[in-house]
Image: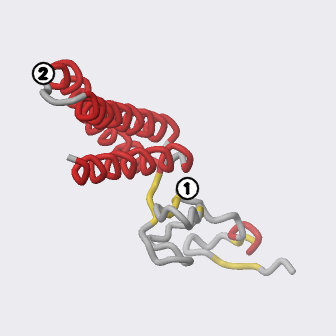
Amino acid sequence: MDTQIKSNSHEVSSATDFDEQPLLSETRTCHNYWCNYETNQSLSRCPKCGRPLLTAQTYRLLGLALVVLGGILAIAGASLLILVAPKVLGGIEVKLLIWGIFGFLLAGGLSIMMAGIWQAWFGKRSQSLVTIVIALLITIGLIAAIGRTLL
């Protein structure tokens, strides 16, 4: 059914001219680790979990922040390994614990940097890199807690 519509300029056009696809906004992704909802609609909150939906540009900016923070953490871990670890007094267990903590600190910083680079490059987060970062940070905490109880 092609109906006729008159516009303000007194021209006649068909209603099918107005049935074009609506413009889609850029892809938005839920930042919830378990949800990962994606849409092209301009929603501000995820309809599944209620968390904010982020655009690719936001993920890129957050990725750059991860690169900077991961670099600081990696430099701190490497500096502690080079400057502090050789000067630690105590038995071999203490030295191995210190080397382990500082090594995991370095590995965690490098992992965070890699996750940030990936996120800044592609505009979305990598679920596997986020899992690695979380696992490394939990491992650092466990090593520190165990070492504290042993010493």
Q: Position of residue 104 (x, y in %)?
A: 35, 36
Which residue shows up at 42% across the image and 36% down it? 111
Q: Answer yes or no: do the residues labelled 2 and 1 have beta carbons within 8 Å? A: no
Instruction: Say if residue 71 shows up in the picture.
Output: no
Instruction: Say if residue 53 shows up in the picture.
Output: yes
Q: Is residue 82 left or right of residue 101?
A: left
Crowdedness near tag 2: few (<14), some (14–19) or many (≥20) residues, C-alpha within 10 Å: few
The residue that label 2 is drawn on is: 87
Q: Quadrant of residue 92?
A: top left
Closer to the chain start, of discs 2 and 1, is 1
Crowdedness near tag 1: few (<14), some (14–19) or many (≥20) residues, C-alpha within 10 Å: some
Q: Position of residue 68 (x, y in %)?
A: 27, 35
Q: Amino acid at mark 1?
A: Thr
Which residue shows up at 34% across the image and 44% down it? 61
Q: Which of 137/114 is in front?
A: 137
Q: Which of 116/58 is in front?
A: 116
Q: Is residue 120 above or below residue 22?
A: above
Which residue shows up at 28% across the image and 53% down it? 145
Q: Position of residue 50 (x, y in %)?
A: 46, 77
- Quarter in which the N terminus is drawn: bottom right
Helix, strand or loop under label 1:
loop
Distance (Cα) linking label 2 and label 1: 52 Å
Q: Which of 5/24 is in front?
A: 24
Q: Position of residue 94 (x, y in %)?
A: 23, 34
Helix, strand or loop under label 2:
helix
Q: Is residue 35 left or right of residue 84?
A: right
Q: Which of 15/92 is in front?
A: 92
The residue that label 1 is drawn on is: 27
Which residue ends up furthest to the front in the rendered image?
91
Q: Quadrant of residue 41?
A: bottom right
Q: Amino acid at mark 2?
A: Lys
